[in-house]
Image: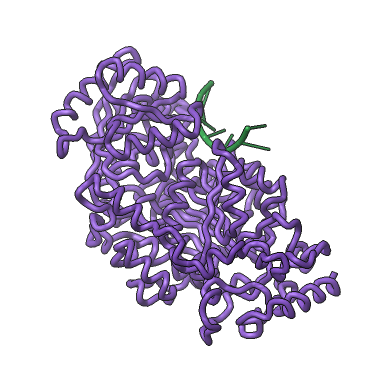
Chain colours: A purple, B green
DNA sequence: AAAAAAG
């Protein structure tokens, strides 16, 4: 193994004696030995070899410290090396470079993602990024735990992200880092694993993208070993639970990596795989994907995870819940991805139930837990209302709301309203009914074709169809500017889902309204909902409090064990090391509720940060 | 019990 490996390295070195082959040694790695010179870091691909060669990312010094065997599993390339692959014999550079030198020499051909954005933004007068109320950041509470937490930074300038990336940050009009960025970026740059609670809309995507891009740019000298000619070896993997969220992350990541030489590719289901395969063949450093399509690509051996240095799970608690966990485990643990410690893993979500934290710790190594408030926090920005509405009255009630809203149209356009329902069928039927009644509505859910889903989302975003009826597919992560009103036509059973849903409004410092239709079918949510609203300084109707009181005795089983936004590191609970059944009841004394105080109550968040969940 | 994610 060693021998063939050394041979490979030697071959590669000879063929591809690139810049940095000696400068970028990984000092401590034994399995990821220093002599893998072929890979040319993106920032050097079309520049003179520079002296710039910062310390190797700590993430990469890891493998030797762990079990040697598991290390070599991924570190040692297989023996099926074919000339003409790695060294660029066939015109390919490392199999992922590119044909026709398109990217390197033809950098000017890289589509400028900022131009597209400018056009899209013209529909609305204000720009999202400039609308952020940065002053609201100052008092944001933060909780960190873990060993040797790197200190936060206050400006992007303090962090050496590289000039190309800095320029993109300016193009994005980011003036100062958001709280999650201030804390998460130094942690990531220090090579540490991270579990971060931060509401979307608080700059979470950038928080994990910047360190990844920066890390890849100053990359190690690593060759992506050949497996099959068509196999590609991304260095970073970003997973998300829905196709649209993957698209969104991809779009953002493209902006951040513009002219850095770092290539971002997205892969998700429901779309023709051929285009995605072509995109991959043109080269990929960061792969953004939904789990199903990624598994497909892995099984076809079109993607290998052998060289993964960064793994980011967005909406991580969702990715690890019952529906997704097996797929995620397969990808992370049963394919060829380096083990924890040999890669850097970052988990992000607005909510992090303790039992999910426990699952997640399998993927992490000596990680730092971080909980930060969001911009302005939803409390002040989102007005939450709950109305008692029988099932049979829901439609006419919705109609009333929409009529009222119509009067408040902005710039001749009706304000955007996002209506959540429980089922796909219910979504179709409500959409149909709204259209019949003269309300321009469309719908997004898992029974629609991907084309229809994307069209619906675009049409909604642009204001052409100002009403979007959605299932939970749209509950998480989607950044849709200008959503004025979220209606929970059907309430979810899980309070965390409610938190995510209402988070589609009141973003980036703007105000939002969230209305929920509550009836007897939702009694199991009463307690959690009423507590949540209280913490958020919202008016809780007396009837809801009565529901809550009733359900809190009698097994109104709402087994959220805590971990909403502002949650707490489960490692701090004494039960952490005990038998697994303890997690569910231990840790918060508030008895079956979803947790104690504090976390969510943004404006009133202050006092309770460290005591949250106690 | 439903939704999402492969076709």
Query: Residue A258 appears at what percent x and percent y?
Result: 43, 64
Q: Residue furthest top?
A: A392
Query: Which residue is drawn at the image coordinates 46% and 73% (left, top)?
Result: A150
Q: Residue furthest bottom?
A: A51
Front residue of A372/A54: it is A54
Q: How many marks?
A: 0
Q: Does residue A549 appear anywhere in the picture?
A: no
The answer to whether A145 is drawn above or below residue A545 in the figure is below
Left or right of A50 in this view: A295? right
Question: Quadrant of residue A293 in the image?
Answer: top right
Front residue of A225/A523: it is A225
Front residue of A260/A58: it is A260
Left or right of A469 in this view: A333? right
Query: Which residue is drawn at the image coordinates 66% and 71% (left, top)?
Result: A62
The answer to whether A459 is drawn above or below residue A219 in the figure is above
Left or right of A352 in this view: A375? left
Query: Which residue is drawn at the image coordinates 39% and 41% (left, top)?
Result: A500
The answer to whether A584 is drawn above or below residue A214 in the figure is above
Q: Does residue A104 appear anywhere in the picture?
A: yes
Q: Residue furthest front?
A: A100
Query: Residue A523 appears at what percent x and percent y?
Result: 39, 24
Query: Residue A217 appears at what percent x and percent y?
Result: 52, 71
Front residue of A202/A287: it is A287
| Quarter that holds the N terminus of chain A | bottom right
Query: Residue A223 appears at what percent x and percent y?
Result: 68, 70
């Amino acid at each position: 193994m060693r021998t063939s490996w050394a041979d490979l390295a030697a071959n590669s070195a000879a063929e591809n004696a690139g810049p940095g082959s000696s400068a970028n040694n990984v000092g401590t790695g034994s399995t990821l030995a220093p002599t893998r010179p072929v890979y040319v870091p993106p920032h050097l691909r079309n520049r003179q070899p520079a002296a710039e060669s910062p310390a190797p990312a700590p993430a990469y010094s890891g493998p030797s410290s762990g079990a040697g065997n598991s290390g070599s599993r991924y570190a040692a390339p297989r023996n099926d090396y074919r000339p003409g692959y790695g060294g660029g014999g066939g015109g390919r550079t490392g199999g992922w470079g590119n044909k026709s030198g398109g990217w390197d020499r033809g950098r000017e051909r890289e589509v400028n993602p900022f131009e597209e954005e400018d056009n899209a933004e013209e529909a609305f007068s204000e720009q999202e990024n400039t609308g952020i109320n940065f002053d609201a950041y100052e008092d944001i509470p933060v909780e960190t735990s873990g060993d040797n937490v790197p200190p936060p930074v206050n400006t992007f300038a303090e962090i050496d992200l590289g000039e190309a990336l800095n320029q993109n940050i300016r193009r994005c009009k980011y003036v100062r880092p958001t709280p999650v960025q201030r804390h998460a970026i130094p942690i990531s740059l220090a090579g540490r694993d991270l579990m971060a609670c931060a509401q979307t809309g608080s700059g979470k995507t950038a928080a994990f993208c910047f360190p990844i891009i920066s890390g890849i740019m100053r990359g190690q000298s690593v060759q992506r070993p050949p497996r099959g000619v068509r196999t590609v070896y991304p260095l970073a993997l970003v997973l998300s639970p829905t196709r649209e969220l993957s698209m969104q992350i991809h779009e953002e990541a493209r902006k951040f990596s513009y002219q850095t030489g770092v290539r971002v590719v997205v892969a998700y289901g429901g779309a023709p795989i051929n285009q995605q395969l072509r995109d991959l063949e043109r080269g990929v450093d960061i792969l953004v994907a939904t789990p199903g399509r990624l598994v497909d690509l892995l099984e076809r051996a079109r993607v290998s995870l052998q060289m993964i240095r960064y793994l980011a799970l967005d909406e991580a608690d969702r990715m690890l819940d019952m529906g997704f966990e097996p797929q995620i485990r397969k990808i992370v643990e049963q394919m060829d991805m380096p083990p924890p410690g040999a890669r850097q893993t970052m988990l992000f979500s607005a909510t992090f139930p303790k039992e999910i934290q426990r699952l997640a710790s399998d993927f992490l190594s000596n990680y730092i837990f971080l909980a930060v408030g969001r911009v302005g926090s939803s409390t002040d920005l989102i007005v939450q209302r709950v109305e008692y509405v029988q099932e049979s009255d829901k439609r006419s009630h919705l109609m009333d709301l929409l009529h009222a809203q119509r009067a408040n149209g902005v710039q001749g356009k009706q304000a955007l309203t996002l209506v959540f329902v429980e089922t796909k069928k219910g979504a179709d039927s409500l959409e149909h009914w709204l259209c019949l009644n003269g309300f321009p509505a469309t719908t997004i859910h898992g029974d629609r074709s991907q084309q229809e889903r994307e069209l619906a989302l675009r049409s909604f975003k642009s204001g052409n169809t100002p009403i979007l009826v959605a299932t939970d597919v749209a509950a998480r992560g989607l950044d849709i500017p200008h959503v004025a009103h979220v209606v929970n036509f059907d309430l979810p059973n899980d309070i965390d889902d409610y938190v995510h849903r209402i988070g589609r409004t009141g973003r980036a410092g703007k105000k939002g309204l969230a209305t929920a239709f509550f009836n007897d079918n939702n009694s199991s949510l009463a307690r959690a909902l009423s507590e949540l609203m209280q913490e958020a300084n919202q008016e809780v109707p007396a009837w809801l409090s009565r529901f809550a009181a009733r359900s809190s005795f009698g097994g109104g089983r709402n087994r959220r064990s805590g971990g909403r936004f502002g949650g707490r590191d489960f490692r701090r609970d004494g039960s952490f090391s005990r038998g697994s059944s303890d997690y569910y009841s231990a840790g918060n004394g508030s008895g079956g509720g979803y947790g104690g105080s504090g976390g969510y109550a943004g404006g009133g968040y202050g006092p309770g940060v460290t005591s949250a969940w106690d």
